[in-house]
């Protein structure tokens, strides 16, 4: 099986003002002072900070990503940001289909797929998020819900272009709760096998599957050691450079 370089991506969500760039500078210091990280490192700040994070992160190898993009390339969409605009900042990634977008903005799998297509078209790597709610897990539907989200949200273009999948159980996001290591392993194996079914084993083996949802310095080592976990999408713990660096170092 191909070895995939893990990706640790920080999702700052709607947090971050210019003074937060001190955390970016601190992260850069930590990353350049210690041994070279074994992971690709990215920060997805709010759109207001994206260009500056892309520029300031570059010298220390910190990549930048958007948190969402519009599906259209341009036009009359007040307040929205296109994938091309995100790419224009120097960013390489964009999160699409985060559960907060799915819930707050009624984003369906079709919308998420269109956004992922737009991202690919702009030369970005979409980080496509999927994950079940607590009620769906309790009903034994977690794997089927995630399978349907994968089928609907991943564009066919993922066959020729790099995409990243992030498994984020909705009930684990920002709650301090995580699935058991066995449940994470089972879900990631199930996602890998769906990707194999759609894209073939060789290509599926190259697709990163991140875990997200209350990844912290305390649990990162165990979670990142699980087979088929190729990194993390980190919310709260990415806001403090020290915590985020500890997670990066756990790879
Ligand atoms: P959390 O968020 O790490 O704060 O749980 C993860 C995410 O929503 O990407």
Image: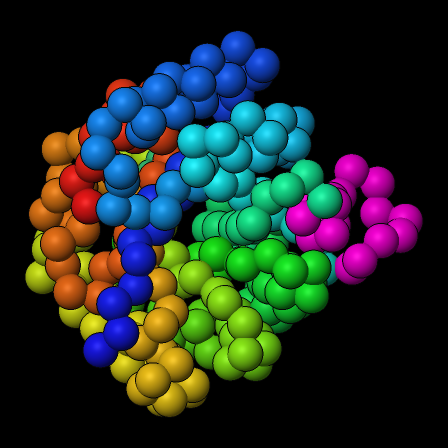
At horizontal 78% and vertical 59% (from top left) the residue drawn is 72
Q: Main secondary structure of the magenta part?
A: loop
Of residues 251 and 143, the one drawn nearer to the viewer in this rendering: 251
The number of numbered discs placed on residues in the rendered structure image is 0
Q: Residue 123 at what x, y percent from top left?
A: 64, 60
- Quarter of the rendering containing residue 199: bottom left
Q: Quadrant of residue 111?
A: bottom right
Q: Which residues are magenta?
A: 72-87
Looking at the image, residue 244 lies above or below residue 38: above
The x and y percentages for residue 59 are 49, 31
Residue at the image point whose x is 42% and y is 87% from the top: 198
Q: Quadrant of ligand 1?
A: top left
Q: Is residue 176 visible?
A: no
Q: Residue at x 43, y 61 (%)?
A: 164
Name the foreground residue: 191 vs 4.
4
Looking at the image, which is closer to me, 100 or 18? Answer: 18
């Amino acid at each position: 099986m191909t070895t995939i370089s893990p990706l640790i991506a920080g999702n700052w969500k709607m947090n971050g003002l210019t003074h937060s760039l001190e955390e970016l500078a601190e992260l850069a210091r930590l990353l350049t002072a210690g041994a070279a990280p074994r992971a690709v490192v990215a920060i997805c700040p709010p759109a207001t900070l994206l260009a500056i994070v892309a520029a300031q992160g570059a010298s220390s190898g910190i990549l930048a990503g958007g948190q969402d993009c519009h599906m259209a390339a341009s036009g009359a969409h007040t307040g929205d940001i296109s994938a091309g605009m995100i790419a224009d900042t120097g960013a390489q990634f964009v999160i699409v289909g985060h559960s907060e977008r799915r819930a707050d903005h009624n984003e369906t799998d079709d919308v998420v797929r269109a956004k992922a297509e737009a991202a690919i078209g702009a030369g970005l790597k979409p980080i496509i998020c999927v994950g079940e709610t607590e009620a769906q897990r309790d009903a034994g539907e977690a794997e089927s819900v995630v399978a349907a989200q994968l089928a609907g949200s991943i564009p066919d273009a993922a066959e020729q272009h790099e995409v990243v999948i992030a498994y984020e159980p909705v009930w684990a996001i920002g709650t301090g709760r995580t699935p058991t290591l066995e449940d994470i392993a089972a879900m990631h194996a199930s996602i890998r096998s769906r990707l194999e079914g759609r894209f073939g084993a060789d290509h599926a083996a190259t697709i990163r599957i991140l875990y997200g949802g209350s990844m912290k310095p305390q649990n990162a080592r165990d979670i990142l050691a699980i087979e088929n976990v190729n990194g993390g999408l980190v919310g709260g713990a990415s806001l403090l450079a020290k915590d985020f660096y500890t997670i990066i170092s756990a790879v």
